[in-house]
Image (cartoon, coloured by chain):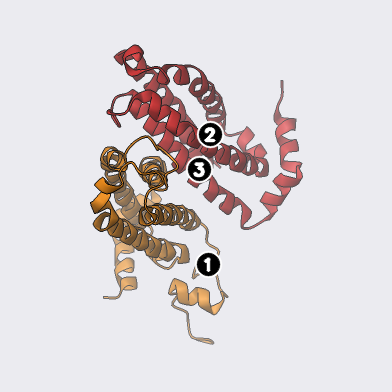
Amino acid sequence: MSLLGFCEWLDSTRWSTAIHESLWGYPLIEATHVWTLALFVGFAALLDLRLLGVALRGVPVSEVARRLLPWTRAGFVIMVATGVLLFYAIPVRSYQNVFFRLKIILLVLAGLNAFLFHAGIFKRVAAWDAQIPPPPRARFAGAASLVLWATIIFAGRMIAYNWFDCDRQPQPAWVNWAAGCVLEEPGG
Amino acid sequence: MNLLPFFEWCETTALGEMVRSSLWLFPVIEAFHLVGFAVLGGVVLLMDLRLLGLVMRTQPAAQVERDARPWLLGSLSVMVVSGVLLFLSEAVKCYYSFPFRVKIVSLFLAVIFTWTLHRKVASRDDRSIGPIRGRVVGLVSLVLWGLVAWGGRWIGFSG
């Protein structure tokens, strides 16, 4: 089954329609997704700013990470859970949305950046825990994370707008390609 | 006092017209507003959860407060500037919006509270704050800022 076929199947399930058409369910899930930005991105940003050496300078990096990461992880779980539900409620349109696709790519990059940081320079944090400014690789990880999460918020917000939706034709060829639109044959 | 004429005037300002007539400006300003929210929300959570004794317990509340304050001011500035632009483009809708009224009143209270009592209590050393006092201040702050966030999200759902 293709991804599009899978999304169409999701769309046909009863709960997808129930969430999409609910008076309070969908807005509440969406609001929770947005509010959790404060916990998840907010705390991640504080750690990033510490890695850049511009916030919480008096607290060792390992201490900031140890204290904030459990909260960040909890925030991440809420983000993923509400995000999956939002996708599940409107699967086909989301799948064929350029901003949704961009967001997924950026999320993978943000995950990669976090993985490389934790598997790399953070393993030797004891050697630079209180150093201001922190080593270049730590600063790079912090800066990359800040830029990625800000762009992810941008892309996420834009999913709501239908400028490039497949049912709004004609679109430039690159938009239809990026969104994976299935177009009828000309004249067909 | 009837404020409706003032809100109507807000919509006719050059900035209001500019945001409203553009396809891209409103969404882009909204996105900046959201990025500001992530940082402001993070800072408020950090300061208040510290006062509640739930996070960064090994650091004095006064130090957490002092370190976080420039970021509080910075992110609040981003939110206010972007928020005013969004407001100018749809002031009359906001005038009739209950969530908008809740948001403005609680924002006013939250800012005053944060820069007076909250600051005074949090900048003392831990032992002189006392367990109850710090917790009450942290909780009141969370409720006030929480109402601001609730109103903000719900303006978009109404109408």
Q: Which residue is mark 3?
A: B36
The residue at the point 56 percent across, 41 percent down is B78
Residue where numbered disc 2 is placed: B73
At mark 3, the secondary structure is helix
Say if residue A109 shows up in the picture.
yes
Amino acid carrying label 2: it is: Leu
- How crowded pointer 3 is (Cα within 10 Å; few <14, some 14-19, many 20+) is rated as many
Q: Nearer the viewer, residue A20 or B153?
A: B153
User: Which mark, residue A164?
Assistant: 1
**Chain shaded orange:** A
The mark lying in front, picked from 2 and 1, is 2
Dividing the picture into quadrants, the one containing residue B129 is top left
- Give the structural element (helix, strand or loop) at label 2: helix
Position of residue B52 measured from the top left corner of the image (x, y, whole percent): 32, 24
Q: CA distance from mark 2 to mark 3?
A: 11 Å
Both labels 2 and 3 in a single chain: yes
- The colour one sees for chain B in the rendered image is red
Front position among marks 2 and 3: 2
Residue type highlighted by circle 3: Gly
Which of the chains bears the disc numbered 2?
A: B
Q: Position of residue A23 (x, y in %)?
A: 41, 44
- Labels 2 and 1 positioned on one and the same chain: no
- Residue B85 placement: quadrant: top right
Left or right of residue A5, residue A42 in this image: right
